[in-house]
Image (spheres, rainbow, N blue to C red):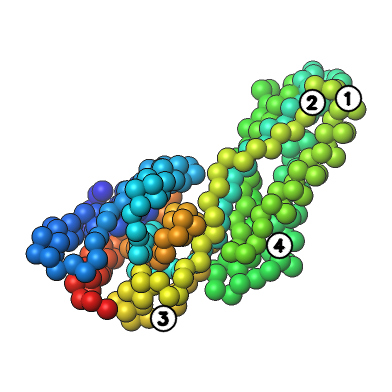
Amino acid sequence: MTDGGDGRLYGRGSADMKGFIACVLAQVPHFAKLATDGKLTQGIGIALSYDEEVGCLGVGRMIDALVEDGVQVAGCLVGEPTSMRPVIAHKGIAHYRCRVKGKAAHSSLTPQGVNAIEFAARLITHIRKLADAEAAFGHRQPLYDVPFTTMQTGLVHGGVACNIVPADCEFMFECRWLPGDDPQRLVSSVADYAATLVQEMKAVSDETGIDIEPAVYSPAFESDPASSIRQYVASLCGCEGGAGVAYTTEAGLFSQAGMPCVVLGPGSIEQAHRPDEFIEVAQLQACYDWLGRLADELTQAR
């Protein structure tokens, strides 16, 4: 990370979430001394996963290992950027890959081809209509910064030249849903509309088709108000409750495995995934101090 001289540290992942990891590792000597002195009433574990951004690939193996080894986890603090304000719920996320197979032709003979990009565009438009309907009429939860289920298309690839009817187009779309919602109802609508498009495509060529496959899935999350970690966070933050957010973390997977969670970490999600990503030094200090207070709290029997 680079010191900008303005009270900020700049670098990819500085907010999401290397800043939190740095704070945790800086507190290890303090944690270790408390453990060596026999002062901890509960153990402190540090879990570092990989490839969270591309589908929470590493955490599943970690959770499986914890369960297999019979490790009892009283609470899990997920250090995603929350500006050190507790997040007690977040949406789930799923990514889907859609491959549209058309038929190539010279662009002067377009009726003899099946334009994969144009059929993909019609399907993308359907996804947008579903998203608009959710925004206008869908269930709302006021706890969330974006209080309804969302959909969007994030990647599109297709075609080889402007004068060739494209035979292939691939795109990826996502759904972010509220706890208690079922994203499958929206994905099923996309699949049903794709089936009607395929009938139209096959009227020109049997070699055409549309394939939709899941690529990423991470469940929605709601914390347990009675959990130890929720009580510790409330006590140390001097607050009750917390926020719900539209982004997704590994907390949903830990919680699904029976490990109570709260999301709390330095920095803002608004700074994540940006070329000039940064974290304020004051946020790092606040996190470092908070972790120290948590460790001290764990030296006292509740």
Helix, strand, or loop for circle 3?
Answer: loop
Tell me which residue sits at (75%, 61%) in the image: 133
Viewer-proximal residue among 236 and 60: 60
Tell me which residue sits at (80%, 21%) in the image: 207
Q: Give the residue type at disc 1.
A: Val
Q: In which quadrant of the rendered view does residue 134 lie?
A: bottom right
- Image vertical order of residue 87 relative to residue 94, above or below: below
Q: Give the number of the disc on residue 204.
A: 1
Q: Which residue is mark 4?
A: 134
Q: Give the residue type at disc 2.
A: Thr
Viewer-proximal residue among 51 and 129: 51
Query: Is residue 282 among what the camera can see?
Result: no
Helix, strand, or loop for circle 4?
Answer: helix
User: Where in the figure is residue 52, as x and y percent of width and height?
Assistant: 43, 46
Q: CA distance from mark 2 to mark 1?
A: 9 Å
Q: Give the number of the disc on residue 208.
A: 2
Tell which tag, 4 or 3, sits nearer the viewer: 3
Q: In which quadrant of the rendered view does residue 140 lie?
A: bottom right
Q: Which residue is mark 3?
A: 240
First of labels 1, 4 by sequence position: 4
Tell which tag, 1 or 3, sits nearer the viewer: 3
Tell me which residue sits at (70%, 57%) in the image: 131
Helix, strand, or loop for circle 1?
Answer: loop
Query: Is residue 37 among what the camera can see?
Result: yes
Q: CA distance from mark 4 to mark 3?
A: 30 Å
Q: In which quadrant of the rendered view does residue 77 lie?
A: bottom left
Q: Residues within 10 Å of mark 4 (few under 14, many from 20)?
A: some
First of labels 1, 3 by sequence position: 1
